[in-house]
Image: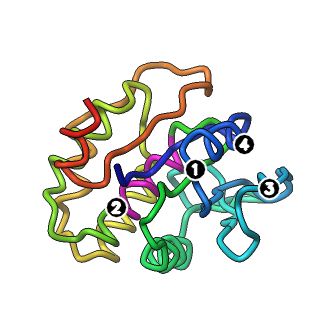
């Protein structure tokens, strides 16, 4: 099954091995260093330095911007989809689920935004996609507000401890084969 593995930082190596991931997208705040799992090739890894905030950054905080979303879209479109894409942030709850939605629509734009958001909620009761990333992604992918509305409709996820990785099926048929 093709999909996007969403993970907290502390479980990226485990998830990369378990799902056979060879490509990874990291959304981490500046200065949060980590080791790339050896299974992920250096040229198949993109790190985007952004904080998990929904407002214009102040001080050392870096808010998601259009250039960050453009990088997510470009990276996703280069993903060969032979194996799941690994996307992570610190807790795997906000930035990485938002990036997973953007990546899914970047490579499969004909899918329904509401269906994709429902698959996200089914895959993770904890996901609360970063609203700023979602809104910028909606605009960048010409979704005309449908992605942002779909994410608002699934609501805030349950409280999480940052230890609940999940697999987001890329397409509805992938979700049917998963269960």
Q: Residue at x 42, y 44 (%)?
A: 129
Q: Residue at x 34, y 72 (%)?
A: 106
**Left or right: where does residue 21 sit relative to residue 158?**
right
Could you say whether the residue bearing mark 2 is in a helix, strand or loop? helix
- Percent position (x, y) of residue 164? 54, 26
- Which of discs 2 and 3 lies nearer the camera? The answer is 3
- Dot placed on the residue nearer the N-terminal end, 4 or 1: 4
Q: Badge 3 local density, few (<14 within 10 Å), some, or many (20+)?
A: few
Q: Main secondary structure of the magenta part?
A: helix
Q: Residue at x 42, y 66 (%)?
A: 81
Q: Point out the stretch of residues depicted in magenta.
A: 94-103
Determine whether 110 is above or below 53 in the image: below
In this figure, which residue is indicated by the disc labeled 2? 104
Q: CA distance from mark 2 to mark 3?
A: 25 Å
**Left or right: where does residue 15 sit relative to residue 148?**
right
Q: CA distance from mark 1 to mark 2?
A: 18 Å
In this figure, which residue is indicated by the disc labeled 4? 13
In this figure, which residue is indicated by the disc labeled 1? 20
Residue 38's disc is: 3
- Which of discs 4 and 2 lies nearer the camera? The answer is 4
- Dot placed on the residue nearer the N-terminal end, 4 or 2: 4
Contact flag, marks 4 and 2 (Cβ < 8 Å): no
- Percent position (x, y) of residue 53? 57, 49
């Amino acid at each position: 099954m093709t999909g996007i593995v969403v993970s907290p930082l502390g479980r990226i190596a485990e998830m990369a091995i378990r799902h056979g991931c060879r490509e990874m997208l990291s959304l981490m705040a500046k200065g949060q260093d980590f080791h790339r799992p050896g299974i992920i090739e250096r040229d198949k890894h993109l790190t985007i330095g952004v904080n998990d905030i929904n407002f214009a950054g102040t001080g050392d905080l870096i808010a998601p911007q259009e250039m960050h979303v453009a990088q997510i879209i470009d990276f996703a479109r280069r993903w060969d989809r032979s194996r799941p894409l690994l996307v992570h942030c610190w807790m795997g709850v906000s930035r990485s689920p938002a990036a997973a939605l953007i990546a899914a629509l970047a490579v499969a734009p004909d899918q329904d935004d509401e269906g994709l958001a429902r698959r996200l909620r089914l895959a993770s009761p904890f996901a609360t996609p970063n609203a700023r990333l979602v809104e910028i992604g909606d605009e960048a992918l010409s979704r005309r507000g449908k992605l942002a509305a779909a994410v608002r409709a699934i609501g805030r996820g349950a409280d999480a401890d940052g230890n609940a990785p999940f697999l987001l099926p890329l397409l509805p048929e992938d979700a049917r084969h998963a269960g």
